[in-house]
Image: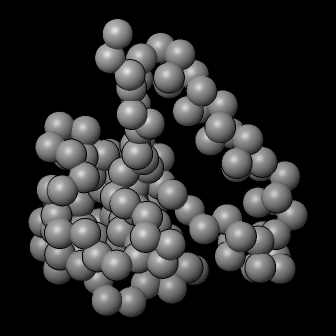
C-alpha cells in the first residue's frame, strides 16, 4: 500500500523541494509496480485526498485542522498519535479494505483527475 501523493505540488515548497526531487518518487513507484506485477502482487495507491494524518486510527474521529508543524497530537478519545505512524496505520487499513472489498467500499468522491481509491490493474487476457 502506498499513498498517491501530489509530488508536483510538494516540490513547490521551497524548503523541501530539493529533498523531494532527489527522492525520485516516480521511479520508485514504477519499480514497485513492476516488481509487484513480476511476483503476482498488487500495488494499491490510497487516494491522495484521504485524510490519513488527521484521522484517529483508534476511534476514527477526524481532526478538522492540523498544520504540518504538528507532529504529535492527542485525540478526544485520549489516544496520542505520532502523525506519520498514525497515517501509516490508516493507509494500511484502507489498503487492506480496498484489496479485500474493492475500490467501492466507500462512495467515490469527485477528485481532480478522476483518480480512483486504488490503482487500477490493466485487464488481463484469458488464454
Residue appearing at x 62%, y 41% in the figure: 29
58, above or below 93, in the image:
below
Q: Is residue 116 left or right of residue 20?
A: left
x and y percent of residue 45 in the render?
A: 44, 49
27, above or below 118, in the image:
above
Quadrant of the rendered image containing residue 117: bottom left
Q: Is residue 21 left or right of residue 74?
A: right
**Which quarter of the rendering shows the N terminus?**
top left
Q: How did the renderer colour the structure?
A: one colour
- Of residue 67 and residue 81, the one placed in the foreground of this image is 67
x and y percent of residue 127 in the render?
A: 35, 10
Please, which residue is most extreme toward the front here? 127
- Of residue 73 and residue 99, the one placed in the foreground of this image is 99
Quadrant of the rendered image containing residue 125: top left
Q: Is residue 16 left or right of residue 18?
A: left
- Of residue 59 and residue 108, the one placed in the foreground of this image is 108
Residue appearing at x 77%, y 49% in the figure: 23
112, above or below 50, in the image:
below
Amino acid at each position: 500500500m502506498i499513498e498517491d501523493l501530489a509530488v508536483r505540488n510538494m516540490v513547490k515548497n521551497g524548503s523541501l523541494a530539493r529533498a523531494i526531487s532527489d527522492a525520485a518518487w516516480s521511479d520508485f513507484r514504477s519499480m514497485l509496480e513492476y516488481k509487484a506485477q513480476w511476483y503476482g502482487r498488487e500495488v494499491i495507491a490510497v487516494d491522495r485526498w484521504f485524510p490519513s494524518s488527521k484521522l484517529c486510527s483508534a476511534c476514527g474521529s477526524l481532526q478538522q485542522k492540523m498544520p504540518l508543524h504538528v507532529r504529535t497530537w492527542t485525540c478526544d478519545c485520549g489516544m496520542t498519535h505520532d502523525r506519520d505512524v498514525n497515517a501509516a496505520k490508516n493507509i494500511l487499513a484502507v489498503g487492506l479494505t480496498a484489496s479485500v472489498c474493492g475500490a467501492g467500499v466507500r462512495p467515490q468522491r469527485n477528485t481532480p483527475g478522476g483518480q480512483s481509491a486504488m490503482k487500477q490493474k490493466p485487464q488481463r487476457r484469458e488464454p
